[in-house]
Every structure is written in structure tokens, then in C-alpha cells.
């Protein structure tokens, strides 16, 4: 039987970030993952369909973990501007890095690139053991330890087990933690698109009555990743629509802002569901990322919310360990739970309200949202606050915020 201090269920971006962050703390860490990265990254490979908008707060965390140079060395596209508008209307707001004297607002990065950089880092760490391919078969919670049985009948013990095993978390379900969930009644269609005009490092988002279309700039000047949130029936139709007809509909949906659009990849669809665990922690258990919450991809904040879960839990585990306290006790995990439940609830409520405001073509609602966009774009002080939220500057735990301060001094 192997003994660890922290066992992490799930070797995705969030779970690996926690493992890397705990290196050097004097704790023994294990990561259990059934699907290790298949093939090393190659610049010759086509862009992955799943991408994330890594904001400034997440970039700060990834830099602290020592993986940001590796991510940039593989493939990351900085974006220096954002534009949001309501189709067939006057509502519009834009953001520019120049407004804050910054080089960029964030980066669009393929999920597998972030994961591979973290996996490579974790595999080199002395305090981290990667158990892969492997799955958990059984977990029994004791007063002072968690007892974990793997699919090969090996057994582990830990002082804390962390659920970073995704939206359909086996660990969350096994711990009988209730889940609040709702169907957004939308499906996201994702694809890689080549545009006639260069994207110029600007992330674009267009609203219309039936859905939300985001164009996220990739490393090539004419290549974008799209996330098209729309009713399930429309997503299904467009997934199999003739290529030329799909390209025409896509060009119109973006108001031809980037000229003609050409499909460069398969089309993949993802049903959109909001989830919010009733508890983010319990005795000898903590939940991270999608295992604790999933939100609408409207603002691309899902992975950033998960990385701030990591940052908060890292800070708490290290502090408690330094103070000689048992960080697996629910009593001590409650600060993490309270903080992250609040952040997730605020984000979920904000995204839901925003989505409902921009849904449908009711003239009164359309006028209201267009006036709102114009006021947000023009009133002093409003846009900088919105930009700070988008960059994650209000969601960082104190220790990471202090790094941000020190880095800018």
C-alpha cells in the first residue's frame, strides 16, 4: 500500500496544475489519470478544436508553475483586443490592451497544449507520482485517511483526495455530493476557420436572436477557432450542412467582419449544461474545476475559474501544512469552499443573466441590451472594471495577487 499526502483524481489541466503547484511543499502527491497524452505536440499538427481563453490571472498562475514558457513555445496566440456586438443593431463594445498599457489581454491556447506542458512538468517533479493509465475503483473515507483502490487492485492512502475528474466526476458522485444543474438549451458547435481578412489578434463575439458566435484568434493571422452557441436543432443541422452552405451561414452570422469564412476542420458539437455542486469540499475531499462547476462558454471563463480554484486550494494547503494543521479536515477546507463557491456562483449568475438578455429578438429587449452595450462602452469607469473582471484580476487569491504586484513593481 502506497501512502501519499494528496491524491488527485484527474490528470487534466486543473488536476495537473495543482500537482505542479504542490511540488516543494514537503508533501507527497499522486495523480490518477486513465488517459495520458497520446502523442507529443508537433507544430505540424492541425489545431485542436478545444481551446481556452487564458486570462491574465491564469497566465500568472501558469508562470508561477513554470510551464508558461513551454506553452508559448508550443502554440499560444495573444489577443490584444475584444469586440462584442449585437447583429442588425447599434449595440457594441470593444476593449483594447492599449487602454491599460498592456501588450495583450490574454491568450487563446489549445487545451491539449496546456495539458501537455503541465504533464511534462509533473512527470519531472520529485514529489509527484503519475499513476497512468489508471482509474479509481473504490474510495473509503476514514477519520484520518482516505483509502483508495485502483483498477489494478493496488491500494493508496491519502490525507486528502481531490476531485479534478471533470463535469461527470466519479468522485463527486461517489461522495454523494448533490449537484444542481440546468440545461442551457443550447449546443456549442466548434471548428477551425480560415478567414479572408486577418483577425489582427482580436477576439470577436456576435449575438443574434438564436445564439452567440465567438471567433477566437489562433497563431496564424487568418485562422480562428469558433464556438457557436445555438439551439440544439440548429447545431445538429449545421454540423452536417453542406460545407459551402455552412461557410455562407457562418460569414453572415459574423456580419462578414472577417470576409469570407472557410472551414478548415471537422465540426464538433457539445451540449451545454450548467452545473454547481452543493459542496466544493467535505471531510478529506475537495473538488476543483468542472467537477465543482461548469458554466456557459459565453465569456470563455470556465478554465480560468478552475485555475483560480487551484490557486486558492494551493494557498490553503501550503498555509495549513506550514502551521502544522491537518489540511484534510473539512473544518480547514471551509475557507476554500466558501471562497470558490462564491466566485463560481457570481460567474454562473452573471453568465446566465447575460445569456438571457441577449436571447431572442424581442424589440424591447433588443433596445435594452443595445443601450446597455453603448453605455458600458462609453461611461467613464465601467469598461475598465469589465476588463479587469475578464482578465481575472478580481478573482485571484492574495498570494497570487501579491505575485502580480511584485511582478509589476
Image (cartoon, rainbow, N blue to C red):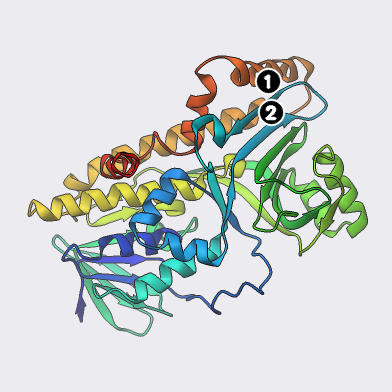
Q: How many marks?
A: 2
Q: Position of residue 42 (x, y in %)?
A: 60, 75
Q: Which residue is mark 2?
A: 358
Q: Which mark is residue 289?
A: none
The residue nearer to you, when weighing 344 against 223, is 223
Q: Which residue is mark 1?
A: 369
Q: Position of residue 92 (x, y in %)?
A: 70, 25
Q: Quadrant of residue 373?
A: top right
| Left or right of residue 210: residue 169 | left
Q: CA distance from mark 1 to mark 2?
A: 7 Å
The residue nearer to you, when weighing 96 against 47, is 96
Residue, far left? 324
x 69%, y 40%: residue: 204
- Determine the secondary structure under disc 2: loop
Q: Is residue 134 above or below residue 167?
A: below
Quadrant where the N terminus lies?
A: bottom left
Q: Position of residue 273 (x, y in %)?
A: 58, 46
Disc 1 + disc 2, Cβ < 8 Å = yes
x 73%, y 43%: residue: 230
| Upstream in sequence: badge 1 or badge 2 | 2
The residue nearer to you, when weighing 227 against 289, is 227
| Left or right of residue 278: residue 82 | right
Is residue 378 in sight in this rendering? yes
Amino acid at each position: 500500500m502506497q501512502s501519499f499526502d494528496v491524491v488527485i483524481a484527474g490528470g487534466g489541466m486543473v488536476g495537473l496544475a495543482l500537482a505542479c503547484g504542490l511540488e516543494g511543499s514537503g508533501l507527497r502527491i499522486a495523480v490518477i489519470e486513465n488517459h495520458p497524452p497520446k502523442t507529443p505536440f508537433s507544430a505540424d499538427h492541425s489545431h485542436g478544436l478545444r481551446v481556452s481563453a487564458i486570462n491574465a490571472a491564469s497566465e500568472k498562475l501558469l508562470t508561477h508553475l513554470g510551464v508558461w514558457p513551454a506553452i508559448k513555445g508550443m502554440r499560444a496566440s495573444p489577443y490584444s483586443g475584444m469586440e462584442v456586438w449585437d447583429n442588425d443593431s447599434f449595440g457594441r463594445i470593444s476593449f483594447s490592451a492599449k487602454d491599460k498599457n498592456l501588450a495583450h489581454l490574454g491568450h487563446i491556447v489549445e487545451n491539449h497544449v496546456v495539458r501537455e506542458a503541465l504533464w511534462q512538468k509533473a512527470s519531472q517533479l520529485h514529489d509527484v507520482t503519475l499513476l497512468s493509465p489508471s482509474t479509481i475503483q473504490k474510495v473509503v473515507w476514514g477519520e484520518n485517511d482516505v483509502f483508495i483502490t485502483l483498477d489494478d487492485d493496488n491500494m493508496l492512502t491519502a490525507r486528502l483526495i481531490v476531485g479534478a475528474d471533470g463535469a461527470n466526476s466519479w468522485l463527486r458522485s461517489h461522495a454523494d455530493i448533490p449537484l444542481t444543474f440546468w440545461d442551457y438549451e443550447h449546443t456549442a458547435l466548434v471548428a477551425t476557420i480560415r478567414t479572408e481578412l486577418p483577425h489582427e489578434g482580436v477576439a470577436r463575439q456576435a449575438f443574434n436572436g438564436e445564439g452567440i458566435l465567438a471567433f477566437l484568434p489562433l497563431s496564424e493571422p487568418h485562422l480562428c477557432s469558433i464556438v457557436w452557441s445555438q439551439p440544439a436543432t440548429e447545431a445538429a443541422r449545421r454540423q452536417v450542412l453542406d460545407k459551402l452552405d455552412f461557410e455562407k451561414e457562418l460569414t453572415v452570422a459574423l456580419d462578414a467582419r472577417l470576409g469570407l469564412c472557410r472551414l478548415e476542420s471537422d465540426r464538433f458539437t457539445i451540449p451545454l449544461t450548467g452545473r454547481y455542486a452543493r459542496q466544493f469540499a467535505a471531510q478529506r475531499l475537495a473538488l476543483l474545476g468542472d467537477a465543482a462547476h461548469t458554466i456557459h462558454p459565453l465569456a470563455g471563463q470556465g478554465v480560468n475559474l478552475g485555475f483560480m480554484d487551484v490557486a486558492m486550494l494551493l494557498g490553503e494547503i501550503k498555509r495549513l501544512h506550514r502551521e502544522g494543521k491537518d489540511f484534510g479536515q473539512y473544518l480547514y477546507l471551509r475557507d476554500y469552499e466558501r471562497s470558490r463557491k462564491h466566485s463560481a456562483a457570481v460567474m454562473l449568475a452573471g453568465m446566465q443573466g447575460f445569456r438571457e438578455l441577449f436571447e431572442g429578438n424581442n424589440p424591447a429587449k433588443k433596445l435594452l441590451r443595445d443601450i446597455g452595450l453603448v453605455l458600458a462602452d462609453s461611461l467613464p469607469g465601467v469598461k475598465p472594471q469589465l476588463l479587469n473582471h475578464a482578465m481575472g484580476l478580481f478573482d485571484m487569491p492574495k498570494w497570487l495577487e501579491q505575485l502580480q504586484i511584485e511582478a509589476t513593481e
